[in-house]
Amino acid sequence: MDHHSLEAFLAVAETGSFSRAADRLFLTQPAVSKRIANLEESLGVKLFDRIGREVYMTESGRLLVERAGRILEDIRDARLAVTQSALSQVSQISVASSHHIGLHYLGPILRQLSDRYPDVHLDLRFLESEQTIEAILKRDLELAFITLPDNLHRDLTKERLWTDPLEFVVAPDHPLAAKTGAIRLNELVHFRAILPEENTTTFRLVQQTFQRHHLPLTRRLSVNYLETIRALVASGLGWSVLPRRLVDDSVRVLAVEKVRLERHLGVIRHAKRTPSRGVLELLEIARSAGQST
């Protein structure tokens, strides 16, 4: 079982097509077919069934797909450890971050990196999620700290570091703040919502919650930054959803029946780009920070 055959297997499993897998791997379709055949021969099982032009994974294929990614990652890690074992310095890292993570999570992580490597040159950019993803895909950046979306481009990988609980909030003098006990989700639709822009993961999370309950989310004001949203909510302009760590005395938390929201924060990087030593060091520090929070 060689890594080239596993890469071909995963490409076919993810694309559902030998030809699309060949395009992704920059190979010919016969080359991909040969790698799959070699893998099936070495394992002694059938991994795919071809029915007409359609490709379907067998039960054995489904079992393998859960492990193949981890196997390839272990191979990459082993190679990296061997090839970079003689390197002891970190010179430059190019990363991006959302404003929220930069303000509330990133400082101690970068301080620890700087303490380990005082001469490191850090190229740090604060970008919106779509800009960040585009920069990673273009290989302009090595790593990005963002709110993790449910769906990510196939060439990117994500890793969760923090869980960020979200709270429904209003101003202390908002009509909903006077209610005792939990409120229903449908009560919110009668008031203006102040939410991040539609292309953000946080907005989609809120939107999906209302859609599951077949409720409209039409009365809203779009604002970029969570700190600005909190200020607008505190002024009485409407309700919003904020990370728990942003909730202070200027707003009142609403208990909403049968609704519990949280988002996941973490890192994304290009799956086909070998991480530099600096990125590996930064990831190690970030993982330790994530486990301690």
Image: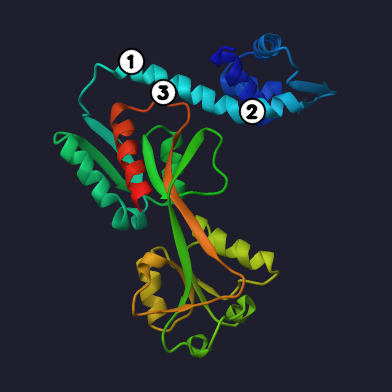
Q: CA distance from mark 1 to mark 2?
A: 28 Å
Q: Residues within 10 Å of mark 3 (few under 14, many from 20)?
A: some
Q: Is residue 4 above or below residue 262?
A: above
For residue 89, say whether it is visible: yes
Q: Residue at x 55, y 66 (%)?
A: 260
Residue drawn at x 26%, y 40% as measured from the top left: 123
- In the rendered structure, which disc, 3 or 1, sits on the residue that comes first in sequence? 3
Point out residue 104 in the picture as x, y percentages from the top left corner: 31, 58
User: Could you say where residue 136 lies in the image, as x and y percent from the top left?
Assistant: 42, 37
Q: Residues within 10 Å of mark 1 (few under 14, many from 20)?
A: few
Looking at the image, is 196 positioned above or below residue 126? below
Mark 2, secondary structure of its residue: helix
Determine which residue is flagged by label 3.
77
**Number of marks:** 3
Q: Position of residue 199 (x, y in %)?
A: 52, 56
Q: What residue is rendered at 47% in x and 23% in y?
A: 74
The kind of residue tagged 1 is Thr
Task: Tell me if I can see residue 200 in this picture.
Answer: no
Residue bearing mark 2? 65
Residue hosting label 1 = 83
Classify 10 Å Cα crowding around label 2: few (below 14), some (14-19), many (20 and above): some
Secondary element at image label 3:
helix
Tag 1's secondary structure?
A: helix
Q: Quadrant of the N terminus?
A: top right
Instruction: Locate residue 201 relative to residue 291 in the image: left or right.
Output: right
Q: Position of residue 65 (x, y in %)?
A: 64, 28
Which quadrant of the structure image shows residue 228? bottom left
Q: Earlier in the sequence, mark 2 or mark 3?
A: 2
To which quarter of the image does residue 52 belong? Answer: top right
Q: Amino acid at mark 2?
A: Val
- Labelled pair 3, 1 in contact (Cβ < 8 Å): no
